[in-house]
Amino acid sequence: MDLTRVDYTPEAAELLRKMTLKHGPLMFHQSGGCCDGSSPMCYPVGMFRVGGSDVLLQKLEVDGLDPIEFYMSASQYEYWKYTHLTVDVVQGRGSGFSVEAPEGVRFMIRSRMLTDEEIEHFGLLKAEAV
């Protein structure tokens, strides 16, 4: 069984294919900024500069596309590190900076807590006090 940090819905996969046809290879960044922390920003590869304080959570494997890297800012990761994320699509306009904004939809994160198996698999066990 492959354990992942980030998955996507069939609707998100469909939109990613459509956006890739328009913009080329894509990547996500989840910053948890001031406006809508549940909406990851989707950019053409090379249009967003990833820094040393960003964490690569997952390379999304969507059929027919190059792997789509999903990054999160380190400060946001500290809040979300025990969380599994699923990229979904909802109606409504999101940020003007994300590629899907003109489409009348936006990517959105749905989350759940990691299982004990996932926490162990991803090396997130807390060190026991001595």
Image: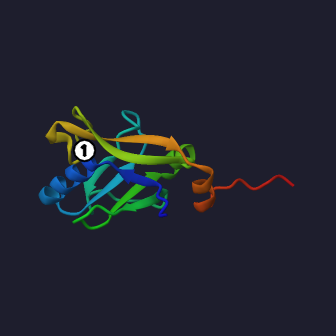
**At which x and y percent is residue 50?**
39, 59
State the image quarter where residue 49 is shown.
bottom left
Residue at 27 percent across and 62 percent down: it is: 45
Residue at 21 percent across and 48 percent down: it is: 99
Residue at 42 percent across and 60 percent down: it is: 58
Residue at 40 percent across and 34 percent down: it is: 34
Residue 126 as seen in the image, left or right of residue 21: right
State the image quarter where residue 35 is shown.
top left
**At which x and y percent is residue 38?**
39, 38
Amino acid bearing label 1: Phe
**At which x and y percent is residue 129?**
83, 52
Residue 37 as seen in the image, left or right of residue 99: right
Residue 31 as seen in the image, left or right of residue 20: right
Q: Residues within 10 Å of mark 1 (few under 14, many from 20)?
A: few
**At which x and y percent is residue 85?**
44, 47
How many circles with numbers are drawn on the protein? 1
Q: Is mark 1 on a helix, strand or loop?
A: loop
Depth check, front residue: 94 or 125:
125
Residue under label 1, please give it. 97
Q: Which residue lies furthest to the right in this view?
A: 130
Say above or below: 37 vs 58: above
